[in-house]
Amino acid sequence: MHGPLKTQTKLMVKISFFASGTPEAQTALEDLTSLYKNTPVEESDIIVVIGGDGTMLETLHKTNAHGKPVYGMNCGSVGFLMNPYSLQNLPERLDKAGKVTIYPLRMNVTDKNGKKHEAIAFNEVSLLRETRQAAKLKISVDNTVRIPELICDGALLSTPAGSTAYNLSARGPILPLSANVLALTPISAFRPRRWHGALLPRHVTVRFDILEDEKRPVSATADFTEIRDVKTVEIRQSRSIASTLLFNPDHHLEDRILNEQFTN
């Protein structure tokens, strides 16, 4: 975006719309584009996403290279990363929106054939067993082995922005955006039974080595990118990639994450 929005008139705000394929989101897209027009993303000032959190994540992956701030409107089921949907006064709401900068995880994988893979995750990187047998994982942090053998369904490393998603379902902690930590959370750990995860500084590198990988195959998924039959997975937070999310003043993400910690 070039220059603050408050210096621009309604007609000068160039918006690029992205919508999920649901009938509700497609109807909203038609209404919004008829009122505000739809600008190609490379020529836009702001990207507006219509749908749920899944659509937001897909859009972040598709448009991140353009460096445009992203404002979501909820026409989905969860919408934790979204603002309420409203057709009217969109440029004014964009003008008043607060900004949150998020940094994704970068996943580097070597599969059983020695092939290298790379992907980024704005929510989390998760490892999951592929068969009926539990996975066996060795976990290292900055080249120091912390857990020689974790027998489990899997494990995940979550960003603060993603900590209320899969991480929370796996009984991981909710992370304030300002905490500058990552959540390492086991999924259905069998041994060691009492290990419930760890909070790690954002600058560390986490490595998973898959033990007995032929007998106990494991997949690794960074948001939407899944790699099957992995042998090693290294994850670190990228500081060279960033996305700016926009939120209404009464719907700020930091406040929503804080409130989520007191929800039954």
Image (cartoon, rainbow, N blue to C red):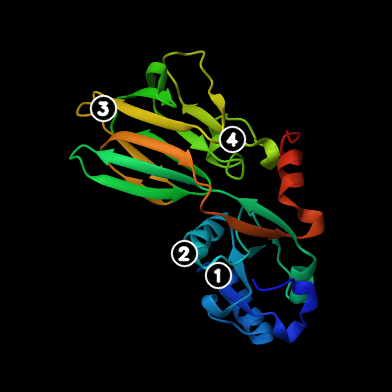
Give the mark toward the camera: 4 or 2. Answer: 2
Residue type at numbered disc 4:
Leu
- First along the sequence among labels 3 and 1: 1
Q: What's the residue at 59%, 58% (across, down)?
A: 52
Which quarter shows the C terminus?
A: top right
> x, y percentage for residue 228?
28, 42
- First along the sequence among labels 2 and 3: 2
- Per the image, the residue denoted by label 3 is 216
Residue type at numbered disc 2:
Lys
> x, y percentage for residue 39?
57, 82
Label 4 with label 2: CB-CB less than 8 Å = no
Label 3 with label 4: CB-CB less than 8 Å = no
- Per the image, the residue denoted by label 1 is 19
Instruction: Classify mark 3: helix, strand or loop.
Output: loop
**Which label belongs to residue 62?**
2
Instruction: Classify mark 2: helix, strand or loop.
Output: helix
Residue type at numbered disc 1:
Ala
Q: What is the C-alpha distance between the residues marked 3 and 4?
A: 26 Å
Which quarter shows the N terminus?
A: bottom right
Residue type at numbered disc 3:
Arg
Residue in front for this viewpoint, 179 or 263: 179
- First along the sequence among labels 3 and 4: 4
- Per the image, the residue denoted by label 4 is 168
Q: What is the C-alpha distance between the residues marked 2 and 1?
A: 13 Å
Q: What is the C-alpha distance between the residues marked 3 and 1?
A: 39 Å
In the picture, measured across the screen, residue 105 lies left or right of residue 201, that is left
Q: What's the residue at 22%, 44% (across, down)?
A: 115
> x, y percentage for residue 73?
66, 64
Q: What is the C-alpha distance between the residues marked 4 and 2?
A: 26 Å
